[in-house]
Amino acid sequence: MKKILILGNSSSGKSTLAKELSLQNNLAHLDLDTIAWDKGTVTQRANIEDSEKQLHKFINENKSWVIEGCYVDLLKLVEKHTSKIIFLNSDVNQCINNANKRPWEPHKYKSKEDQDKNLDILINWIKDYYARDDVFSYKQHMEFYEKFEGEKIILDKTKNNSPRKSIKRYKI
Protein backbone atom coordinates (compact mmCIF):
# COMPACT_ATOMS: atom_id res chain seq x y z
CA MET A 1 0.00 0.00 0.00
CA LYS A 2 1.30 3.40 -1.00
CA LYS A 3 0.57 6.32 1.28
CA ILE A 4 2.34 9.43 0.06
CA LEU A 5 2.42 13.02 1.35
CA ILE A 6 3.57 15.82 -0.95
CA LEU A 7 4.44 19.21 0.51
CA GLY A 8 5.92 22.46 -0.74
CA ASN A 9 5.26 26.13 -1.46
CA SER A 10 2.04 27.34 -3.05
CA SER A 11 2.11 26.76 -6.83
CA SER A 12 5.18 24.49 -6.57
CA GLY A 13 3.56 21.67 -8.53
CA LYS A 14 2.16 19.57 -5.65
CA SER A 15 -1.25 19.07 -7.28
CA THR A 16 0.25 18.28 -10.68
CA LEU A 17 2.61 15.69 -9.20
CA ALA A 18 -0.12 14.21 -6.99
CA LYS A 19 -2.46 13.82 -9.97
CA GLU A 20 0.26 12.10 -11.99
CA LEU A 21 1.13 9.71 -9.14
CA SER A 22 -2.55 9.05 -8.54
CA LEU A 23 -3.10 8.06 -12.16
CA GLN A 24 0.13 6.05 -12.50
CA ASN A 25 -0.37 4.11 -9.27
CA ASN A 26 -4.17 4.01 -8.84
CA LEU A 27 -4.03 6.12 -5.67
CA ALA A 28 -6.85 8.11 -4.12
CA HIS A 29 -5.94 11.82 -4.17
CA LEU A 30 -6.70 14.48 -1.57
CA ASP A 31 -5.82 18.14 -2.05
CA LEU A 32 -5.69 19.57 1.48
CA ASP A 33 -7.02 22.88 0.17
CA THR A 34 -10.43 21.19 -0.02
CA ILE A 35 -10.54 20.57 3.75
CA ALA A 36 -8.31 23.33 5.15
CA TRP A 37 -10.57 26.30 4.40
CA ASP A 38 -14.10 27.25 5.37
CA LYS A 39 -16.47 26.41 2.55
CA GLY A 40 -16.89 29.30 0.14
CA THR A 41 -13.76 31.19 1.17
CA VAL A 42 -10.03 30.67 0.87
CA THR A 43 -9.18 33.36 3.39
CA GLN A 44 -10.53 31.72 6.56
CA ARG A 45 -9.12 28.43 7.83
CA ALA A 46 -11.60 25.78 8.81
CA ASN A 47 -11.68 24.53 12.37
CA ILE A 48 -8.70 22.14 12.72
CA GLU A 49 -10.91 19.48 14.33
CA ASP A 50 -13.25 19.51 11.32
CA SER A 51 -10.31 19.22 8.94
CA GLU A 52 -8.92 16.35 11.01
CA LYS A 53 -12.22 14.45 10.83
CA GLN A 54 -12.30 14.78 7.04
CA LEU A 55 -8.66 13.78 6.78
CA HIS A 56 -9.13 10.62 8.85
CA LYS A 57 -12.28 9.77 6.93
CA PHE A 58 -10.26 9.93 3.70
CA ILE A 59 -7.42 7.72 4.95
CA ASN A 60 -9.85 5.21 6.49
CA GLU A 61 -11.79 4.92 3.22
CA ASN A 62 -8.71 4.46 1.00
CA LYS A 63 -6.01 1.79 1.25
CA SER A 64 -3.55 3.65 -0.97
CA TRP A 65 -3.43 7.40 -1.37
CA VAL A 66 -1.54 10.59 -2.10
CA ILE A 67 -2.26 13.69 -0.02
CA GLU A 68 -0.82 17.06 -0.97
CA GLY A 69 -0.70 20.46 0.61
CA CYS A 70 1.35 23.05 2.41
CA TYR A 71 -0.29 22.67 5.85
CA VAL A 72 2.21 21.12 8.27
CA ASP A 73 -0.45 21.08 11.01
CA LEU A 74 -2.63 18.81 8.83
CA LEU A 75 0.29 16.75 7.49
CA LYS A 76 1.32 15.90 11.06
CA LEU A 77 -2.15 14.42 11.66
CA VAL A 78 -1.51 11.66 9.10
CA GLU A 79 2.26 11.35 9.38
CA LYS A 80 2.09 8.03 11.25
CA HIS A 81 -0.01 6.53 8.41
CA THR A 82 2.40 7.69 5.71
CA SER A 83 4.89 5.47 3.89
CA LYS A 84 6.69 8.23 1.95
CA ILE A 85 6.92 12.00 1.73
CA ILE A 86 7.97 14.11 -1.22
CA PHE A 87 9.10 17.66 -0.55
CA LEU A 88 9.06 19.99 -3.55
CA ASN A 89 11.72 22.59 -2.80
CA SER A 90 10.81 25.09 -5.47
CA ASP A 91 12.21 28.20 -7.05
CA VAL A 92 10.02 31.14 -6.02
CA ASN A 93 10.05 32.61 -9.53
CA GLN A 94 8.79 29.32 -10.99
CA CYS A 95 6.03 29.20 -8.37
CA ILE A 96 4.99 32.74 -9.32
CA ASN A 97 4.99 31.76 -12.99
CA ASN A 98 2.84 28.72 -12.15
CA ALA A 99 0.43 30.90 -10.15
CA ASN A 100 0.03 33.27 -13.08
CA LYS A 101 -0.85 30.33 -15.34
CA ARG A 102 -3.08 28.54 -12.82
CA PRO A 103 -6.33 27.34 -14.35
CA TRP A 104 -9.61 28.03 -12.59
CA GLU A 105 -10.00 25.98 -9.43
CA PRO A 106 -13.76 25.54 -9.03
CA HIS A 107 -13.33 23.74 -5.70
CA LYS A 108 -11.96 27.03 -4.30
CA TYR A 109 -13.54 29.85 -6.30
CA LYS A 110 -16.93 30.60 -7.83
CA SER A 111 -15.31 31.87 -11.03
CA LYS A 112 -11.94 32.42 -12.69
CA GLU A 113 -12.46 36.15 -12.12
CA ASP A 114 -12.87 35.60 -8.36
CA GLN A 115 -9.72 33.51 -8.37
CA ASP A 116 -7.75 36.16 -10.25
CA LYS A 117 -8.80 38.81 -7.71
CA ASN A 118 -6.65 36.96 -5.17
CA LEU A 119 -3.64 36.53 -7.46
CA ASP A 120 -1.64 39.42 -5.94
CA ILE A 121 -2.22 37.99 -2.46
CA LEU A 122 -1.08 34.55 -3.65
CA ILE A 123 2.06 35.93 -5.30
CA ASN A 124 3.04 37.85 -2.16
CA TRP A 125 2.38 34.68 -0.16
CA ILE A 126 4.68 32.71 -2.47
CA LYS A 127 7.41 35.35 -2.22
CA ASP A 128 7.39 35.15 1.60
CA TYR A 129 7.76 31.34 1.73
CA TYR A 130 11.41 31.34 2.77
CA ALA A 131 11.00 34.25 5.24
CA ARG A 132 7.88 33.08 7.13
CA ASP A 133 7.83 30.76 10.15
CA ASP A 134 4.22 29.54 10.00
CA VAL A 135 2.80 26.09 9.16
CA PHE A 136 3.02 27.00 5.45
CA SER A 137 6.70 28.03 5.47
CA TYR A 138 9.89 26.50 4.11
CA LYS A 139 11.24 26.33 7.66
CA GLN A 140 8.34 24.22 8.92
CA HIS A 141 8.30 22.08 5.75
CA MET A 142 12.01 21.33 6.16
CA GLU A 143 11.60 20.53 9.87
CA PHE A 144 8.73 18.16 9.04
CA TYR A 145 10.84 16.53 6.32
CA GLU A 146 13.90 16.15 8.53
CA LYS A 147 11.94 14.61 11.43
CA PHE A 148 10.05 12.13 9.23
CA GLU A 149 11.45 8.67 9.90
CA GLY A 150 10.09 6.91 6.81
CA GLU A 151 11.15 7.08 3.19
CA LYS A 152 11.51 10.62 1.91
CA ILE A 153 12.53 12.49 -1.23
CA ILE A 154 13.36 16.13 -1.87
CA LEU A 155 12.81 17.25 -5.43
CA ASP A 156 14.99 20.33 -5.55
CA LYS A 157 13.35 22.48 -8.20
CA THR A 158 15.56 25.44 -7.34
CA LYS A 159 18.05 23.90 -9.76
CA ASN A 160 15.60 23.73 -12.70
CA ASN A 161 14.69 20.09 -12.10
CA SER A 162 11.26 19.19 -13.42
CA PRO A 163 9.28 17.09 -10.89
CA ARG A 164 8.11 14.84 -13.72
CA LYS A 165 11.67 14.12 -14.81
CA SER A 166 13.00 13.84 -11.26
CA ILE A 167 10.27 11.56 -9.92
CA LYS A 168 10.99 8.94 -12.58
CA ARG A 169 14.37 8.36 -10.93
CA TYR A 170 12.57 7.03 -7.84
CA LYS A 171 10.36 4.01 -7.44
CA ILE A 172 7.09 5.29 -6.05
Image (cartoon, grey):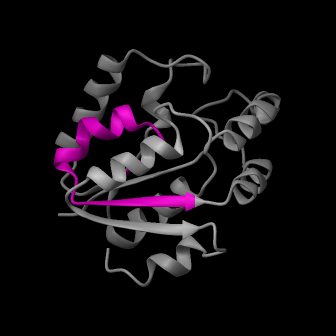
Rendered position, 109 above or below 148:
above
Of residues 38 and 75, which is closer to you in this image?
Answer: 75
Rendered position, 19 above or below 141:
below
Q: Quadrant of residue 71?
A: top left
| Residue at 37% in and 80% down | 170
Rendered position, 93 above or below 61:
below
In this image, 55 relative to 103: left or right? left
Q: Which residues are magenta?
A: 67-89
Rendered position, 132 above or below 92:
above
| Residue at 44% in and 38% down | 32
| Residue at 44% in and 46% down | 141
Of residues 106 and 153, which is closer to you in this image?
Answer: 153
Of residues 28 and 164, which is closer to you in this image?
Answer: 164
| Residue at 75% in and 51% down | 96
- Let me know if residue 79 is in the magenta part: yes
On the image, the x and y values in percent for residue 79 come to 24, 45
- Let me know if residue 113 is in the magenta part: no
On the image, the x and y values in percent for residue 155 come to 49, 68
Pick the quarter of the image with the C terminus.
bottom left
Pick the quarter of the image with the N terminus.
bottom left
